[in-house]
Image (cartoon, coloured by chain):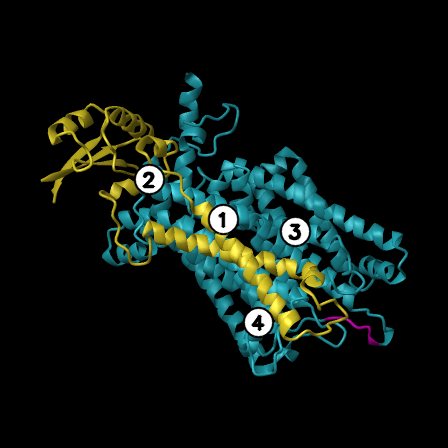
Chain colours: A cyan, B yellow
Amino acid sequence: MQREAAIREPLILGDKSYKDITDDVVGPIQGPAPIGWKIMITISSIIAVYGVGCILYLIGTGIGVWGLNKTVGWAWDITNFVWWVGIGHAGTLISAVLLLFRQKWRMAINRSAEAMTIFAVIMAAIFPGIHMGRIWVSYWVLPLPNQFGSLWVNFNSPLLWDVFAISTYFSVSLVFWYIGLIPDFATIRDRMTKPFAKKIYGLLSFGWSGRAKHWTRFEEVSLVLAGIATPLVFSVHSIVSMDFATSIVPGWHTTIFPPYFVSGAVFSGFAMVQTLLLVLRKGMKLESYIHVKHVEYMNIVIIVTGSIVGVAYLTELFISWYSGVEYESYAFINRFSGPYSWAYWIMMTCNVISPQLFWFKKIRRSLTATFALSIVVNIGMWFERYVIIVTSIHRDYDPSSWGEFYPTSIDIGVFVGTMGIFLTLFLGFARFFPVLALNELKTILKSSGENYKKIQDKH
Amino acid sequence: MNKVFHVMYDDDDTLKTAASQLVAKGIRVKEVFSPFPIHGIDPIIGVKRTRLGIVAFMFASTGTALALLGMWYFMISDWPMNIGGKPNFSLIENLPAFIPVTFEFSVLCGAHGMAITYLLRNGTLPGMPATNPDPRTTDNMFVMEITTEQNSLAAEALESAIKETQLFELSIKDYK
């Protein structure tokens, strides 16, 4: 049996047995839906329907309904795309990178963080899709034999790399998530009494029976998938950053972008995990499994990645001056003192100053402060993308074409709508899926459970 | 008539001790059903290391080769185009720009190839029936399956050896 130092805080609080873990996670699925859940899903589905309406109107009318103009050709759509992809990164970081580092605290949060990843990537994929204008020909991004002469897609373009990166990331995350879910679906299947529910979970569990050889394979597959998902997660956001970095637009054309975007992605992703999980643990009474220690660990990741992002902001500023390129210098002077300075300073406050508050142990371990700061970070990271995208292009090389971007109601409707769709999917997950990785949590009960640690201390 | 023993334990460590005791007596344990992976059970009951890692490597290598072959064909052989003056008249010249897609496609093939092989080898596919002997084995119980067919001992001798372990429940069934 694996042992853990007694001074480490237990990861599972209270006097829990294997059966209690099953009861705590499967119980809410068997019981009736709580009233709070019904209210939340009603609100989020109304917002989702409104968002779908805006998207359909956009597709029917054309992207002229957005506030884009000749100078600012990319704005909210790409901001939202990068924001959502970034949020997705925390799920893979928790499930893959922390698995490789043998961080056991990930087991309480990985399932819901991965669900968040998948839903966030779906939301992200909407934006480049609808930005094409003619979404019905979106298959043109694939290298298919075609009737237009031998015209192939351009493999030298980061926009095409992005197609491969996002689709690989989505499908690999989905497989990783589902392979982990299979044994837990089997647990639900064997506990369900209603024949219809039993049948559905039976189908979802693929006939999993928990044989020794299957478990060996399960662990191998999890490890190898984690091993290849780790470079994948870094590559995806690096490629997203190259959409900008390989262009010759001042403010975008910087080699710092890949690491800066990746740490920003993890930073915003962890903030979103905090926002969602702090509500989830309360609503589903999972306080024994996701507690202050987990929140503290995540806040430490937020300090680290937030500080990397802060350093990157300052490096960008310094290099724009040090490079001696006047266009580059102007792009940054315009960022912090031009018409979008308000957005720049929101970004600086939310992303550079606010995470530093987590150096104080009191704040780091306070759930209320964490919840508030996680929302601040989410807002800050949205503005980061907005600042990078809009302020860099709204004043181009030709002053007569300088302009500003004003979002229309459709811009706002589509963005708010994706939040509604995302929340609807996440609430559906919370109601019908095992929100904690049951089988993994059971493996750490004896080494990190509070009751077992007490017994261990006596000996 | 052959007999199958399903010996249930309420703890993973108890099962592991019991399995060691039985194996020491020359009894072959056919299968273990558990709600989570019991670390260290494999060498006791003779489960070999899985080769899925090798499978993943083979699929990923195939992906690498396919991606490079595809991009060579599309961008260099079939229709070379001058895109912003970027070199695209030989694979080696154009290779740096091909690395991202090569990597992504290798990961795609490796991950999906391994996942599909895993499901096929396990026989866990949509619509397959569950085969665990007791529904509690996905919750908090651990079951060891021992058959008379795989053991030279008589059913009675097996039963008495099994009863010496700290078992929770025992069920004996006949099968042909």
Q: Chain of mark 1?
A: A
Q: Toward the viewer: A315 or B143?
A: B143
Between the residue at mark 3 and the residue at mark 4, the CA separation in whole angstroms equals: 28 Å
Circle 3 SS class = helix
Figure quadrant of the C terminus of chain A = top left
Which amino acid does the dot numbered 3 rest on? Val
x and y, in percent, of residue A136 in the image: 53, 78
Q: Which residues are magenta?
A: A401-405
Mark 2 vs mark 1: tell me if same chain.
yes
Which amino acid does the dot numbered 4 rest on? Pro
- Residue carrying label 2: A212
Among numbered discs 3 and 4, the one appearing first in the sequence: 4
Which label belongs to residue A262?
Answer: 3
x and y, in percent, of residue A13 in the image: 44, 33
Among numbered discs 4 and 1, the one appearing first in the sequence: 4
Which amino acid does the dot numbered 1 rest on? Leu
Mark 1 and mark 3 in contact? Answer it, CB < 8 Å. Answer: no
Mark 2 vs mark 4: tell me if same chain.
yes
Mark 4 vs mark 1: tell me if same chain.
yes
